[in-house]
Image (tube, coloured by chain):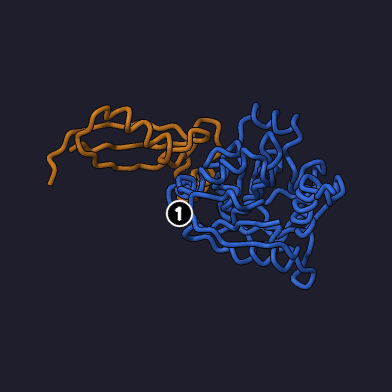
Amino acid sequence: MFKVQVYVTLKEGVLDPQGKAVRGSLLSMNYDEVQEVRVGKYIELFIEETENLDERIDSMIDQLLANPVIEDYRYEVEEVVSN
Amino acid sequence: MKFAVIVFPGSNCDRDMHHAIQEGIGEEVHFVRHTESDLASFDGILLPGGFSHGDYLRSGAMAATSPIISAIKKEAEKGKPVLGVCNGFQVLLEAGLLPGAMLSNEGQRFICRTVELRVENTKSIFTTSYEKGQIIRIPVAHGDGNYFCDEETYKSLKDQERILFTYEDNPNGSVHNIAGISNERGNVLGMMPHPERAVESLLGSDDGLKLFQSIVKSWRETHAVHS
């Protein structure tokens, strides 16, 4: 079994209204040093051993988990003991 | 003319859309579930607003993987009119039928009110019954209505006159005030405002009627009975 940790982030240059609101709150809490906040998504997949693992993960992300128009992604694969 | 209103789990403007067609313009209309895979018997396809699949992951992302999507693509390729409103627009973007993507509103708030739109182009099958530059009043109701595309895409949308509607007073941060765009061929339209909620002056506005009337008018012109 593999645990895949997928990080989906907004592309550089794409406005992040959520991040902007979070920064606003941090500033109002006197964390004046915060220059920018970008909010992304973290997704865990548990995948059975399969051929072309990386290729299949890439296509899952491209087809559904991330939108290439506005988002970038990266992932880490770790082998885990299945329950 | 025979319309299909696509129903996804979480669609909630499907009945309004049905009403706009049946009562508003008096044409035939049927509900079609997202699990269906054939739309060949319909002349026009309508994707309603709502929160398909709970808007989980991204608005419209999961609906865009439904079996019905390949049927919609097939009919769109034949040139049939396809209209996506609100969540329906988001589904068309996620399915790649229209360019760009939707972000959450600039102000992070759900907006539900009537806005003014400018009709930018009256050559489209969706807008022939309007006047160019006409200001129409149509309701919006969305949290993720902030349309985004890169400058290159914007340039091609503009050059090909595919921006059909713009906001007079941008409510959500959409690039260049874009409220509705069509595909290159002109038969697929996505828009955030709800024309199906503006078909009776008693309920505030009937400015949406002309959109549906335009579709039927264009269809009749190309399907005229030759005697």
Instruction: Kindly indicate the quadrant of the structure image that contains residue B12.
Output: bottom right
Q: Quick check: A82 left or right of B192?
A: left
Left or right of B211, for residue A61: left
Vertical placement of residue A7 versus B62, above or below? above
- Residues packed near mark 1 inside 10 Å, few (<14), some (14 to 19) or many (20 plus): few
* Residue B13 in picture, x, y percent from top left: 59, 62
Q: Where is residue A24 in the image (x, y as percent from the top left)?
A: 52, 47
**Chain containing the residue with disc 1:** B
Chain letter, colour orange: A
Which residue is nearer to you in this view: A13 or B89?
B89
Residue lying farthest right?
B131
Q: Residue furthest bottom?
A: B202
B65 to A4, vertically: above or below: below
Is A65 on the left or on the right of B166, as rendered?
Answer: left
Where does residue B143 sit, x and y in percent of width and height? 56, 54
| Residue A33 shows up from this direction | no
User: Which residue is drawn at the image coordinates 72% and 37% (left, top)?
Assistant: B162
Identify the residue at horizontal 53%, vertical 34% (top origin).
Answer: A69
Q: Toward the viewer: B26 or B203?
A: B26
- Image side of residue B59 versus residue B120, left or right: left
Q: Let me know if residue A4 appears in the view.
A: yes
Residue designated by label 1:
B35
Tell me which chain appears blue: B
Q: Exactly how many numbered labels are in the figure?
A: 1
Pick out the residue farthest to the front: B227
Q: Which amino acid, mark 1? A: Thr
The vertical placement of B46 against B173, above or below, is below
Quarter of the rendering containing residue B93? top right
Q: Look at the image and tell me in which quarter the N terminus of chain B lies.
A: bottom right
